[in-house]
Image: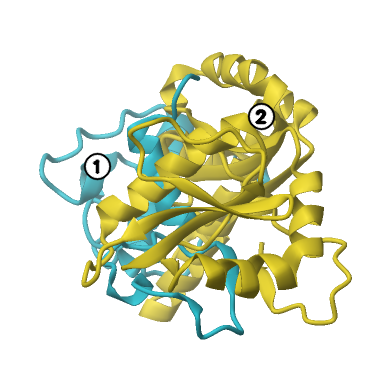
Amino acid sequence: MSSPVTGGLAEALNILLDKGLVIDASVRVSVIGIEILAIEIKVVIASVDTYVRYLEAMLRLEVARRDANNGTTPPAVPAGQGLAGTYGLLTTSVPVAVAPSPQPVPAMAAPAPATGPEEK
Amino acid sequence: MRLNLHGVAWAGHPPPHEGTPLRLVAWQDLAVIVSELPSGHVLNEQDALAHLDMLCALVRNGPVVPFRFGTTAADASDIRTEVLAPGAARLRGQLDRLDGLVEVHVYLRFEEDAALRTVFEEGTDRRRFVAGPDLGGQIRAGEEIARRLVTWRRATSDALLAPVSEVARNEVPLAEREHTEERRAFLIPHSELETVRTAVAELPHNLGAELVGPLPAYSFLTESTGTEANRHSAPASRWGW
C-alpha cells in the first residue's frame, strides 16, 4: 500500500468532500468553492426502478421454488425483457406456460399468497 | 492571491517533498499546511483530488487534521490569528489523539442476484416480498427487501471484515450508494496497514473488495480536550460523523 488507489481515491473524495475542519466564525478564513463544484455526492437513491428490480427477482425466485417443489423446469427467460432477464413489469403476470401447477401462480400485483417457511 | 488550507499538523511535521506547492505556516508547535491559490482560480474536481492526494501523502509522516476542501485564508497572519491561536488547545488535542493513526476505507460490492437469493431463502415471511396492487404497495415491498438486503449485507460484512475490526481503534459506516455495497471507514494504527492490506486482499475476489488509504482521519474527528472559551472551529460532517 505505497499509495492510494487512484480510482478508490476518487470514490473516497465523494465521501469526504464535505467533511473536515471548518472555521465557521471568521470572515478572514472561509470555505469557498464547494457550491460551484459539480462533484456528485453519491448516496443511495432508492428509486422505484430499484424496487421493481428487487420485486421481479423475488418473483423469479418464488416461481423457481414452486417449480422445484413441483418437479418441473422453469421456462427459458425471454431475452431482452426487464433487467437481468426478469419478466417485465410488476403488473404483468408471470408467463402462464411455466408449468401445470396445482396452485395458480399469482401476478405480483395480486393479493399476496401465503408463503411461509413451511413452503420452503 | 489567497492561501488554500489543507490541514493542521505539528510544526515539526516533515516538510512536503520538493516540487510540491505546499508549505507550512507555523505558530508555536502547530502549523497549517497551505498552498497558494491564484486569484480568480475556481476550485474544481482536480483541485479536490490533489488536496486529498497531498493529505494522503502527508499523513504517512504524522497526524494531520484535514480542513474541509475549499478553506482559504487571505494570508499567513490570518492563519495564525484566526485558526491556530484561538484553536490551539483543541488542535493539539486532535493531533495527540490521532498520533500514529490513519483512516482507511474498505468497499465491498456484493453481487445483487446472489444477495437477493440469500434474502429470499432466509426470508421467514416472503409474502412481504410481494407487491400490492398499487405503487405504494410496490414501494413498501421494495423497501422491505432493501431493508433485509442491508441487514444481511451488514452482518456478512461484519464477519468478513472481522480481521480489520480487530486491529482498528474505531470504525464507522460510510454513506452507501447501493444496498449491496458496504463502505466502512476504519481508524487503524499506521503500523497495521500491512495487516489490513493482507486481510482485504484475502477476501473473496467476487466482492471486488477495495482498500483506500492511508487517509487523514476525516471520519473520526471529534470534540477534543481544548479549553478555550472561544470554540470557534469544529470538525464538521453532513452525516454527523
Question: Does residue A77 sit above or below A115 in this rendering?
Answer: above
Question: Does residue B91 sit above or below B202 in this rendering?
Answer: below
- The residue carrying mark 1 is A84
Image x and y of residue B161, in percent: 66, 29
Image x and y of residue B225, in percent: 87, 62
Return the residue nearer the eye: B146 or B51: B51
Badge 2 density bin: few <14, some 14–19, many ≥20, Cα 10 Å: some
Label disc, if present, on residue B161 of the rendered structure: 2
Q: Are marks 1 and 2 on the same chain?
A: no
Write the residue at 30% across / 33% down. Answer: A74
Observer-side mark, 1 or 2, equals 2
Question: Dividing the image into 4 quarters, which one contains the C terminus of chain B?
Answer: bottom right
Q: Is residue B180 left or right of residue B191?
A: left
Note the chain letter of the cyan one. Answer: A
Q: Secondary structure at mark 1?
A: helix
Q: Secondary structure at mark 2?
A: loop
Q: Are marks 1 and 2 in contact (CB under 8 Å)?
A: no
Image x and y of residue A39, in percent: 30, 62
Quarter of the figure with residue B118: top right
Q: Is residue B99 left or right of residue A85?
A: right
Write the residue at 70% across / 79% down. Answer: B232
* Amino acid carrying mark 1 in the image: Ala
Return the residue nearer the eye: A6 or B182: A6
Quarter of the figure with residue B61: top right
Write the residue at 52% across / 57% down. Answer: B175
Task: Give the image's coloring scheme.
Answer: by chain
Q: Is residue B12 left or right of residue A82?
A: right
Note the chain letter of the yellow one. Answer: B
Image x and y of residue B220, in percent: 69, 52
Chain of the residue displaying label 1: A
Whether residue B133 is visible to the viewer of this picture, yes or no, is yes
